[in-house]
Amino acid sequence: MPLEENRPLAPFTTLGIGGPARWFVEAASEDEIVEAVAWARERRVPLFVLGGGSNLLVADAGFDGLVLHVARRGMTMEESRADGRTQGIVRAAAGEPWELCVERSLDAGWAGIECLTGIPGTVGGTPVQNVGAYGQEVSSVIERVRAFDTEEGRFVELSAAECGFSYRRSRFNASDRGRFIVTRVDFRLTPGGAPTVRYAELQRAIEAALPDGSRPSLAEVAEIVRRIRRSKGMLIVEGDPDCRSAGSFFKNPIMREDFLHTSAACNAPHFPAGVGAEGCVKISAAWLIEQAGFSKGYALGNAGISSRHTLALINRGGATAREILALAEKIFDAVEARFGIRLEREPVVVGF
């Protein structure tokens, strides 16, 4: 096992913030993952599993334990028949870049994740956060997740139903946080399927791009999504300060619809909360933040809000983790004071 000491973690994050890991190992195989877990357990050392670092804030002091960077690569694609339909099965190792998985699926003409293009990070992180954007979530296309169960000391394969998916949640970051280390994800896509076009902003962008009303291809929808993400600073572009972020820092709160109608947030843009949340709506966190007095480009020291996307907190240059959290807390408190709603943080924090 290639063990290092005092490895800087900031370069492994899209925020570019954080101190070193006391110990660090890059695991390219399942055997190395098992070995790293055993090493940490024998020495009673805290363990943190690092993927693409796109949804992560590391403490300025770093992490006083073992950071396991999952770097297992490999991807296969095959078609199968089930219930009289052709399905495209993508089996991708956890360390594969997510964007590569999307690109390979688009090249094959397989529908199901075209709206999730441009999202940084690795395949292994997608089921943990139930990654979603522009009307799609990975939970709708995940067939199976292979993971190492650190409690039972064995590999397991969990169906989508066993993953406990909900909005930006799964058993991996909720009830069983820290228990499972994802090593592979199997996706069930639709060869020749139509793109998903249900998100209002995406619909408007497609109408503007295709004024003749023609039906967009998977590739066209993906390109339009990337264009939207770029306009918001949510696409990683070298040299763009708005890209030094962890993506959306705040989750859209899910509230009961009757609360919304009787609260100060009654005029907030809102959307159906989805399956399993009947009687609830998802409220625009961006609207709440802006109405609480925080506009795009707001700065607090070296931390700030993106000039193009209210939900993204950015490293304006030399920002510390403490500065990012101080700005987040200021926003949390202001929104709660104005609307009685406590926003939730989306990124994982480590070392605090």
Image (cartoon, rainbow, N blue to C red):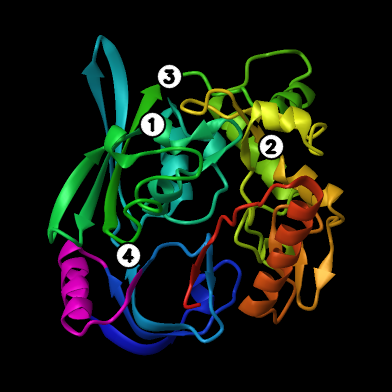
- Disc nearer the start of the sequence (4/2): 4
Magenta stretch contains residue 39: yes
Q: Are marks 2 and 3 in contact (CB under 8 Å)?
A: no
Residue shown at 43% from the left, 19% from the top: 192
Q: Which amino acid type corresponds to the residue marked 4 in the rendered image?
A: Val
On the image, the x and y values in percent for residue 244 come to 66, 66
**Cα separation between marks 3 and 1:** 15 Å
| Kind of element beneath mark 3 | loop
Q: Which amino acid type corresponds to the residue marked 3 in the rendered image?
A: Gly
> Are there few (<14), some (14-19), or many (20+) residues within 10 Å of tag 2?
many
In this orientation, does residue 134 appear? yes
Residue, disc 4: 70
Residue, disc 2: 283
Disc assigned to residue 167: none
Q: Is residue 343 above or below residue 196?
A: below
Say which of marks 2 and 3 sits in front.
2
Q: Which residues are magenta?
A: 28-48
